[in-house]
Amino acid sequence: MESDSDHALIEKKQKKTETQIDHPRDWHQLVRCTGKKHPFKVVEMDQSKFFNYAKLLKTELQVKKKDETGNLFYWRDIREIMIDKNNLGVMYFKTGINESYRCLSFRKRGSLAKLIPELQYKGLVPITAKKKDNLMKLLPYISDVFWDFYTNLPTNQADDIHPDLESSDEDE
């Protein structure tokens, strides 16, 4: 996959760099400097740009197995996606480079509701207490300028599971 070679470039750059990486912004800068011919564009995202689309799928939208022309739809076959902000709840996609766009509506039949997703996170995303304990053990190896960042990370008592992987109903 293309992303595998991108990650390999980043890892190679990180091994060759003299700069110490103590903070997430250090990673942003390293990635920006990776790739001689085609440098990576890093977009720093804050929580105002993460939305809860899963909640819309439980209320106003639904996952469909057929596109607008009645053809079976498989996520794994998609090569290109286009979303039109003026036609929310509808996705245009291609399964081949030279194809024309096909249409898939996620709206429930007859639904004209406004599709406004809620913010995904209301505050900082907590990490597990175990993960924070491990980070605290590494503080002596990190510049003390960044200690406040790590000591002030919020924690919860949940198991060490990625929040976006709670449940997945992806098709075959």
Image (tube, grey):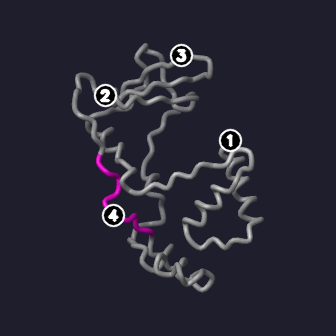
Location of residue 52 with respect to 144 vertically, above or below: above
The amino acid type, in three-letter code, at marker 4 is: Gly
Q: Residue furthest right?
A: 16
In the picture, the quarter occupied by the N terminus is: top right
Q: Residues within 10 Å of mark 3 (few under 14, many from 20)?
A: few
* Residue 86 on image: x %, y %: 33, 28
Closest to the camera, between mark 2 and mark 4, is 4
Between residues 45 and 102, which one lies in front from this camera angle?
Answer: 45
- Work out whether mark 3 precedes mark 1 in sequence or the reverse, and give the earlier one: 1
- Work out whether mark 2 precedes mark 3 in sequence or the reverse, and give the earlier one: 3
Q: Residues within 10 Å of mark 2 (few under 14, many from 20)?
A: many
For the residue labelled by badge 1, is the local secondary structure a helix, a strand or a loop? helix
Instruction: Give the residue number, with chain letter if any, for mark 4.
Output: 123
Residue plotted at (45% across, 24% down):
92
Q: CA distance from mark 2 to mark 3?
A: 22 Å
Q: CA distance from mark 2 to mark 4?
A: 30 Å
Q: Is 129 included in the stretch rendered in magenta?
A: no
Instruction: Give the residue number, with chain letter if any, for mark 1.
Output: 2
Q: Which mark is residue 100?
A: 3
- Work out whether mark 1 precedes mark 2 in sequence or the reverse, and give the earlier one: 1
72 sits to left or right of 63: right
- Tell me which segment is drawn in magenta: 118-127
The amino acid type, in three-letter code, at marker 2 is: Arg
- Work out whether mark 2 precedes mark 4 in sequence or the reverse, and give the earlier one: 2
Q: Which mark is residue 20?
A: none
Residue plotted at (54% across, 78% down):
134
